[in-house]
Structures are given as structure tokens and as C-alpha cells.
């Protein structure tokens, strides 16, 4: 190796080492305040517009320019209040605790439509559920309640599907 090549080699190693040393990877974990369980696939939005998604274990990571720098981010998850926080970069894993939220409505309508086999005309059935009616039902949650209605199928991932019943909330 000649002196010029050796000089460029050390110059590149020197600058790359300095750049890599200035980058810190910050790890974070998203958990539920209610259960303490990790929250997989929570969505994270950073102040610069970039985003991340937590993995199966509720973990995500991002790069900081240096230890001690702070980053503002917002974490969201269905059924939980958004969490807006400012994190200081460190070697520790930050735990972000999310609070559950309740969506409350005074009433909702479930409308069922069925094609009659004799004349193929449409009939309609309307079920009105107010807060008093909901209190008397044995269902512990909305999914159980809606699945108990003939012709209605509710799936956590797909929503209401493959049904002849119209559900209006």
C-alpha cells in the first residue's frame, strides 16, 4: 500500500468512527397502565414527521444524534388515549405507559335486513339499544353483544362483515 492510500484509509476510518459514535439508538417499550402488558404494533409519530411501529413485544427504537438529546413523540393505540411525551436519549430502555379510554354513547341502532324466501322482498328489523337496555343484557362487551344478534358477525381484525344485517352505531 502506498502512503496516499494508507492516508485515505485512516481518514475514512477516523470520520466513520466519529459519525458512528455520535449516533445513539434509543429503545422504548409501550405498555398498558391497566394490565402492564406490552402493546404490540402501537404507532409512534416523531416531531420531524417520521414514524415507527412497535413490534410483537411492544418495542421500538429510533436514532438520536447524541446522548442527552431529547425527542418529542406521540404514541397511539386503539382503545387508549394518545401519549405525547418528550424523551431524553440514554442507554436505558424507556417504558411508555398508555392509559385506556372508554368510548361512551347514549344509544345506538342495530338494523337487520333479510330477504324473505317466498317473495324475495326485503324485510327490516330495527333493534334500538339505549343505556338502560344495555345494562340488562348479559353481554360483557360490545363484541359479545353484536355476535349474539342473528346474522351479525364481528371480528377484531376485520370489523363487521359477511352479514345481511346493517349495524348503525
Image (tube, helix red, strand yellow):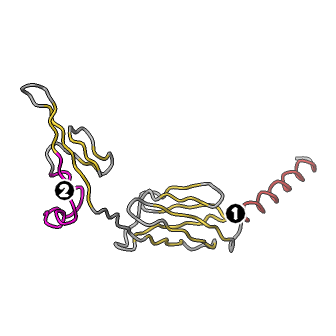
Q: Residue at x 89, y 47 (%)?
A: 5
Circle 2 Cα neighbour tier, 10 Å, few/some/many (<14 / 14–19 / ≥20): some
Residue stretch rendered in magenta on the structure:
126-148
Q: Give residue 14's quadrant in the image.
A: bottom right
Where does residue 118 sit, x and y in percent of width and height?
6, 26
Q: Residue at x 68, y 72 (%)?
A: 67
Which circle's residue, 2 or 1, is located before the other in the chain? 1
Q: Is residue 143 magenta?
A: yes
**Picture disc at residue 23:** 1
- For the residue pair 120 and 24, the one nearer the viewer reads as 120
Q: Give residue 136's quadrant in the image.
A: bottom left
> Would residue 25 be found to the left or right of residue 19 on screen?
left
- For the residue pair 96 and 26, the one nearer the viewer reads as 96
Where does residue 64 sit, x and y in percent of width and height?
67, 64
Which secondary structure lies at badge 2? Answer: helix
Which secondary structure lies at badge 1? Answer: loop
Q: Which residue is mark 2?
A: 145
Farthest residue to the top: give it. 119
Amino acid at each position: 500500500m502506498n502512503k496516499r492510500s494508507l492516508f485515505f484509509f485512516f481518514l475514512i476510518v477516523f470520520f466513520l468512527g466519529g459519525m458512528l459514535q455520535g449516533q445513539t439508538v434509543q429503545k422504548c417499550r409501550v405498555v398498558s397502565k391497566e394490565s402492564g402488558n406490552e402493546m404490540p404494533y402501537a404507532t409512534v409519530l416523531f416531531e420531524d414527521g417520521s414514524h415507527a411501529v412497535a413490534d410483537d413485544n411492544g418495542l421500538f427504537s429510533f436514532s438520536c444524534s447524541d446522548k442527552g438529546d431529547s425527542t418529542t413523540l406521540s404514541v397511539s393505540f386503539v382503545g387508549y388515549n394518545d401519549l405525547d411525551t418528550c424523551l431524553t436519549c440514554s442507554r436505558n430502555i424507556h417504558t411508555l405507559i398508555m392509559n385506556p379510554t372508554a368510548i361512551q354513547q347514549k344509544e345506538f341502532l342495530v338494523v337487520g335486513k333479510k330477504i324473505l324466501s317466498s317473495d324475495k322482498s326485503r324485510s327490516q328489523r330495527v333493534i334500538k339499544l339505549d343505556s338502560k337496555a344495555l345494562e340488562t343484557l348479559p353481554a360483557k362487551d360490545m363484541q359479545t353483544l353484536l355476535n349474539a344478534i342473528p346474522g351479525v358477525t364481528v371480528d377484531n381484525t376485520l370489523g363487521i362483515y359477511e352479514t345481511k344485517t346493517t349495524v348503525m352505531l
